[in-house]
């Protein structure tokens, strides 16, 4: 253990993602939204084109400006093209592992009923269209990429080798491969299912009517921020590719991390209507409590929009790399200058200020219950943050960032001062056991 914090870095570590890539994606999304509004294209397919319009500029920026494909972290050496005959057996083994993985995901989609009801039906339709295309592209793509990979025997290869009964298969590689695709399969279906909703609302919006009321203005801007978040997050789950340096390095190996994350998403969500942690139990919300007080409504709306903007900004900062439960490169710019978990901090602050659980027309018991439930939800997100840090601490780059954040970022500094000062800061810079 360290005896002090003098060894902590003064300089903030470089971010794995540039600011420019996020700006490129925002411009692409804004352009498509403008076109969709002019044309009245508010349907689900237009929303999915929006994902393409957001992602394409980011891919071009990543390759042409940031030149991410040349980074050593991709595991690619473009100067060493191996003959196809030398890697063909490896590629075929890898393809066997990939196809088996996709088949397992498809079976789960078919067996789990929630994937065929509500918004998930659209996800299944989109994935059904994409499946044969991915199958056809995967063969030449894998063979092409394996020619340049320094070590083409990745998790997919080890899974294929295990299926083929080869003793050289590494079980740890297989487990990480399965966890990585479990993340992608679970969350991609969810993200696609919610892409159309907010997008359609923005396209159909009557701006003149909305601007006449500060509450409607705030609600519209909040929806807009969530559209940004959903578009960028969906792209993140789609483009887990090594040439973009956006591949999954590791998926969280800790069961606690999976439990903490999954209870925040359907079908396991505990915060949904009727769930044990459904937080919106108030008979009124912020616009009701402040009704008639236009200056206070406007001020409260600005704060809520700002918090939602920080939440969206945290996703934009990931560029092509956003996804839960994974390590895809350490992000140190944007809102991550202020706290290690800007999305969780802003989201929970938004819930507290939007619902005001300690205000109620009911009894004191109602007030206590509402406040306790929302406090429990904040506890869940604290739990998520800790399990994510435990996973990322295995990377020296994250330990360097955590050390910098604990002594320079405003939120961790305040928390460390409040709950133990330097001893806590030092503890959080240690590798996970």
Image (cartoon, rainbow, N blue to C red):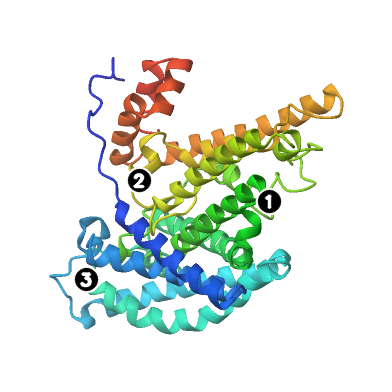
Q: Disc 1 marks which residue?
A: 268
Quadrant of the frame with the N terminus: top left
Element type at mark 3 = loop
Q: Residue 294 lies in what quarter of the image?
A: top right
- First in sequence: mark 1 or mark 3? 3
Give neighbour class at mark 1: few <14, some 14-19, many 20+ (Cα, 10 Å).
few
As displayed, is residue 57 above or below residue 327? below
Q: Disc 2 marks which residue?
A: 331
Residue 275 position, x and y percent, is 76, 45
Give neighbour class at mark 2: few <14, some 14-19, many 20+ (Cα, 10 Å).
many
Residue 367 position, x and y percent, is 79, 26
Estimate the spatial distance between the alpha carbons at disc 2 and disc 1, rounded to whole Å.
28 Å
Identify which residue is drawn at 41% across, 67% down. 28
Residue 164 position, x and y percent, is 43, 72
Element type at mark 1 = loop
Identify which residue is drawn at 61% across, 70% down. 123
Q: Is residue 348 visible?
A: no
Q: Is residue 157 visible?
A: yes
Q: Is residue 339 left or right of residue 20?
A: right
Element type at mark 2 = loop
Quadrant of the frame with the C terminus: top left
Q: Residue 357 lies in what quarter of the image?
A: top right
Q: Disc 3 marks which residue?
A: 148
Give neighbour class at mark 3: few <14, some 14-19, many 20+ (Cα, 10 Å).
some
Q: Is residue 355 left or right of residue 161?
A: right
Between 91 and 339, the one lying in front of the other is 339
Q: Is residue 257 left or right of residue 376?
A: left
User: Can you tell which of label 2 and label 3 is closer to the viewer?
Assistant: 2
The single residue placed furthest to the left in the displayed view is 79
């Amino acid at each position: 253990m360290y005896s002090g914090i003098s060894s902590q870095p003064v300089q903030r570590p470089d971010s794995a993602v540039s600011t420019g890539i996020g700006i490129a994606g925002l411009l692409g999304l804004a352009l498509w939204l403008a076109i969709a509004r002019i044309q009245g294209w508010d349907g689900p397919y237009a929303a999915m084109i929006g994902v393409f319009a957001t992602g394409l500029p980011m891919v071009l920026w990543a390759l042409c400006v940031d030149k991410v494909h040349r980074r050593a972290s991709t595991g690619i050496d473009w100067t060493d093209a191996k003959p196809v005959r030398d890697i063909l057996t490896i590629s075929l083994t890898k393809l066997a592992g990939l196809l088996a993985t996709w088949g397992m995901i498809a079976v789960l989609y078919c067996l789990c009923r929630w994937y065929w009801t509500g918004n998930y039906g659209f996800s299944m339709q989109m994935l059904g269209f994409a499946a044969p295309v991915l199958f056809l592209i995967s063969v030449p793509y894998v063979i092409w990429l394996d020619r340049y990979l320094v070590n083409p025997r990745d998790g997919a290869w080890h899974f294929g080798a295990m299926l083929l009964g080869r003793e050289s298969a590494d079980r740890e590689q297989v487990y990480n491969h399965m966890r990585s695709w479990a993340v992608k399969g679970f969350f991609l279906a969810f993200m696609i299912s919610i892409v159309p909703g907010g997008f359609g609302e923005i396209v159909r919006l009557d701006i003149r009517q909305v601007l006449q009321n500060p509450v409607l203005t705030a609600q519209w801007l909040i929806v807009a921020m969530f559209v940004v978040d959903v578009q960028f997050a969906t792209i993140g789950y789609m483009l887990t590719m090594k040439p973009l340096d956006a591949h999954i390095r590791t998926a969280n190996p800790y069961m606690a991390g999976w439990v903490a994350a999954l209870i925040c998403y359907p079908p396991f969500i505990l915060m949904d209507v009727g769930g044990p942690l459904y937080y919106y139990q108030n008979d009124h919300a912020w616009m009701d409590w402040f009704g008639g007080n236009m200056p206070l409504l406007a001020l409260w709306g600005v704060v809520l929009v700002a918090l939602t903007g920080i939440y969206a900004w945290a996703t934009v900062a990931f560029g092509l790399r956003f996804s839960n439960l994974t390590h895809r490169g350490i992000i140190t710019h944007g809102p991550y200058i202020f706290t290690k978990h800007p999305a969780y901090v802003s989201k929970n602050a938004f819930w507290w200020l939007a619902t005001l659980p300690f205000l109620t027309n009911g009894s004191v018991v109602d007030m206590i219950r509402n406040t306790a439930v929302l406090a429990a939800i904040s506890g869940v997100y604290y739990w998520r943050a800790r399990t994510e840090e435990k996973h990322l601490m295995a990377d020296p780059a994250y330990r360097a960032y955590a050390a910098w954040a604990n002594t320079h970022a405003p939120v961790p500094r305040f928390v460390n001062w409040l709950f133990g000062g330097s001893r806590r800061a030092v503890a959080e810079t240690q590798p996970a056991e």
